[in-house]
Image (cartoon, rainbow, N blue to C red):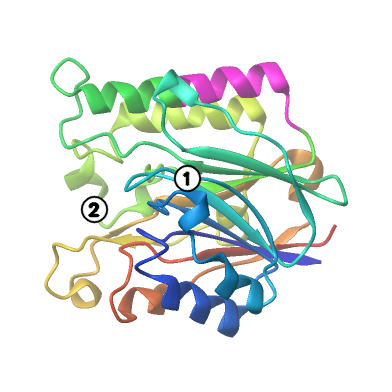
């Protein structure tokens, strides 16, 4: 069995102590980070190695984006893809010794206006998701786990108010449709919702709220999916809400799942 976690850290250098705390207290076998905002060579990798996470596959860039996979288990680099040709570090893959491939994604947020004619970033987000769909159709992934900040809360109970967020980027029908098409193309199983099939569930709370905990206007933007051949081995899903209250937190919290493989 191994446990995997995904977390948009919003600067791995700024929040190195939080990553170290999570690794020490929760000890996932694999931690996938998004929005590391750092070139790989400037990541604080020695501190993570000292905690037992000596294996790293990452793609970074200065000040923006960036994805990394930290592991206590041996992993090999399985490549990356520049979805929608944005020139961004938004995807990286690694392979475990048991043959399981882990894909770590950071889907574009999409800006504030859900209209590609008025907002180039929203168009880029839709194009990114379309290329994910096409890649999954072509590659027919097997024995794979996909995690990351997908920047979409697809279900009505993945947001604090379905009605009020229908025209808000991350929960608009067109985004949900595009994400669903990508999921269907790879026949991906949403492990979190397989384990927790009903009820409000969030992994992100805005910095704009004066008291995020009391307001509780969250969204489930962070996901763990698996291909059907291994989805049955996934279990133990949980979202670490208390992490949002740590000092100088990310606006996202870690999402966990375990696999008996």
> In front of the other: label 2 or label 1?
1
Describe residue 224's horizontal placement relative to residue 169 as left or right: right
- Front residue (pair 169, 120): 120
State which region is magenta. Answer: 129-141
Q: Taking 162 as reference, is 239 above or below it?
A: below
Describe residue 134's horizontal placement relative to residue 211 as left or right: right
The x, y position of residue 79, in whole percent, is 66, 34
Describe residue 35's horizontal placement relative to residue 169 as left or right: right
Residue positioned 21% across, 36% down in the render? 111
Residue positioned 30% across, 63% down in the render? 251
Query: What distance separates the C-alpha of mark 2 from that of mark 1?
Result: 34 Å
Q: Which residue is mark 2?
A: 161
Residue positioned 57% across, 17% down in the render? 134
The x, y position of residue 208, in whole percent, is 13, 62
Q: Residue furthest right?
A: 98
The x, y position of residue 258, in whole percent, is 70, 64
Q: Which mark is residue 60?
A: 1
Q: Quadrant of the C terminus?
A: bottom right
């Amino acid at each position: 069995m191994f446990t995997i976690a995904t977390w948009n850290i919003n600067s791995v250098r700024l929040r190195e102590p939080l990553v170290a705390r999570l690794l020490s207290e929760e000890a996932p076998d694999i931690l996938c980070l998004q929005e590391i905002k750092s070139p790989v060579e400037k990541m604080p990798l020695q501190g993570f190695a000292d905690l037992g996470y000596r294996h790293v596959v990452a793609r970074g860039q200065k000040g923006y984006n960036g994805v990394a996979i930290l592991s206590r288990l041996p992993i090999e680099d399985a490549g990356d893809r520049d979805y929608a040709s944005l020139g961004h570090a938004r995807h990286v893959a690694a392979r475990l010794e048991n043959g399981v491939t882990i894909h770590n994604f950071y889907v574009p947020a999409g800006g504030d206006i859900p209209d590609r004619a008025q907002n180039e970033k929203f168009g880029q987000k839709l194009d990114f998701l379309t290329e994910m769909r096409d890649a999954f159709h072509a590659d027919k992934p097997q024995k794979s786990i996909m995690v990351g900040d997908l920047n979409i809360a697809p279900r009505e109970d993945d947001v604090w108010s379905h009605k009020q967020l229908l025209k808000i980027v991350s929960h608009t029908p067109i985004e949900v449709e595009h994400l669903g098409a990508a999921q269907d193309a790879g026949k991906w199983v949403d492990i979190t919702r397989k384990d927790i099939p009903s009820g409000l569930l969030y992994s992100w709370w805005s910095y704009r709220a004066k008291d995020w905990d009391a307001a509780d206007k969250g969204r489930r933007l962070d996901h763990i999916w698996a291909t059907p051949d291994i989805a049955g081995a996934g279990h133990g899903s949980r979202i670490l809400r208390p992490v949002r209250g740590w000092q100088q937190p990310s606006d996202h919290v870690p999402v966990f799942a375990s696999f008996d493989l």
